[in-house]
Image (spheres, helix red, strand yellow):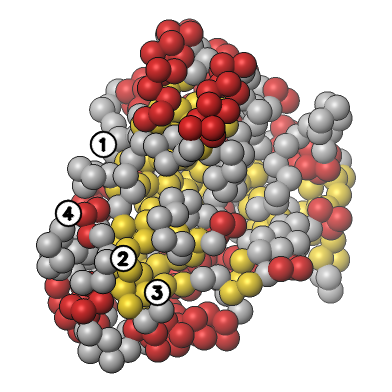
Amino acid sequence: MVDMSRSLEAPAYDATADEAFAADGTPREPYAELLARLAATDLEELRSSVAGEFADAGVAFGERADSTTFPLDPIPRLISGEEWRLLERGLAQRARALGAFLADAYGERAIVAAGRMPARVIESAEQFEPWMMGGPAEPAACVTGLDLVRGSDGVLRVLEDNIRTPSGFAYMAAVRTALDAHLPFAEESARLDPAPAFQMLGEALRGAAPDGSGDPSVALLSDGPDNSAWWEHTEIARRLDVPIVSPEDLFVRRGRLYAGLQNAGARELQVVYRRTDEDRLRDGDGSPTWLAGALLGPCRSGTLAVVNPLGAGLADDKLVHAYVEEMVRFYLGEDPLVPSVRTYDLGDPEVLESAMPRLRELVVKPRTGYGGAGVVVCTHATDEDCQAVAERVAARPAAWIAQETVRLSTHPTVCDGALEPRHVDLRPFVIGAGEEAAVVPGALTRVAFEAGALVVNSSQNGGGKDTWILR
């Protein structure tokens, strides 16, 4: 058995930014009871058992050639009901504003005309799709994933918005199933159940059908086993009882999209839940991609709904993130309930002038890219790295953004049989568009397993934790 108090006294455990322990090592509420029960648990055996549960279930992440079991830590993260109720309202609010922005960006651009956002923010974004101009007034449906981090003041803030193809949905549910099999003292009545997430997604997809009636033909579009989230694709399709189709299955006939399904022949599709790595309509030389060839015509003619919408990657642009709070005020006439991590538009000469002398205090990110690629946390970087990124920003300021540095909170994580602090973020999900946008009753906590690491993405040795939303 592991002596919980002894493990906390280890020099490696710095509880100054921990969510479960106060700086003096005493458990915070509501963790006291959970940690007391864990004190009588062999933590390494618990970790191994939960990992084995995931392996047996085939829960994996990564491309076919190097797919591995999705890493899972068995110590759940607890979110109070009071905090969650505020998050629910604020995240739904944010998703509604982002949906309104996408419609406006590809439409009249009222936010630009009102002087609340420069036109260059839209037009210079890598994920902006000119071929979608004049598209639907509002997205038929969206699955929005938000990345939230907790700073030293205890406040959860949105670090990034993900509407292109957010992943983690099925992993969230699988984490709960695996952990509950080996952590029997969880009180079901005291936590929200994330299981309704699949029903919410199914209803949103069916409701996105262009004709708005009947039982539409829905399919999940995937790259296949070469997609790093292939396990999630198969799990969602199984839960929703919809087929998975690949690019080679699709063809267009008389302005409508069809898929050739094994043992079922050709079937017209009214709704496609797109989970492909390819999300651009044009390639590097401006020619149509296969995605445009298959989906653009039916989408523009009104016979097909694509979830998430073609062109939605615009909302993932890290410079667009700097204006989301303004979107909430402009489109909804409300104050943001959940704040963003303050983000600086370095393409604005005045902002650039004020930010450059402070660069050593900031996080610098390329506008595009995923998984933490190219991000420089200047407070932790060497002088040489900071000088190099300062030169890159000075040469092409519009290609970069800067954010205030947030000291990410830590959470007790099992490492070699003892608890050690590891940095975490939170990925909740919002399903639906407009007034129908609703927050899934659960979230995936992502954790960086390396000591001191700040990037929690699965592609960089990150993993997941169960998140208990307390009632």
Q: Label 4, on which residue?
A: 82
Q: Looking at the image, which residue is at 43% across and 10% down? A: 353
* Up-down relation of residue 210 to residue 366 (above or below): below
- Horizontally, residue 440 falls left or right of residue 274, namely left
Q: How crowded is mark 2: few (under 14 residues within 10 Å), some or many (20 or more)?
A: few
The x, y position of residue 241, in whole percent, is 62, 70
Mark 1: which secondary structure?
Answer: loop
Give the Cα distance between marks 2 and 3.
Answer: 11 Å
Q: Which amino acid does label 2 sit on?
A: Ala
Query: Does residue 338 appear in this view?
Result: yes
Q: Are marks 1 and 3 in contact (CB under 8 Å)?
A: no
- Horizontally, residue 438 falls left or right of residue 261, namely left
The x, y position of residue 57, in whole percent, is 57, 82
**Residue 415 - label:** 3
Q: Looking at the image, which residue is at 26% across and 36% down? A: 337
Quick one: which residue is furthest to the front in this view? 383
Q: Label 1, on which residue?
A: 337
Q: Residues within 10 Å of mark 3 (few under 14, many from 20)?
A: some
Q: Which amino acid does label 3 sit on?
A: Cys
Q: Which amino acid does label 4 sit on?
A: Glu
Q: Which amino acid does label 1 sit on?
A: Leu
**Sequence-earlier tag: 3 or 4:** 4
Q: Do the residues labelled 2 and 3 touch (CB within 8 Å)?
A: no
**Residue 12 - label:** 2
Which label sits in the foreground, 2 or 3?
A: 2
Q: Are marks 2 and 1 in contact (CB under 8 Å)?
A: no
The x, y position of residue 141, in whole percent, is 53, 44
Q: Looking at the image, which residue is at 46% across and 85% down? A: 48
Which label sits in the foreground, 3 or 4?
A: 3
Quadrant containing the N terminus is bottom left
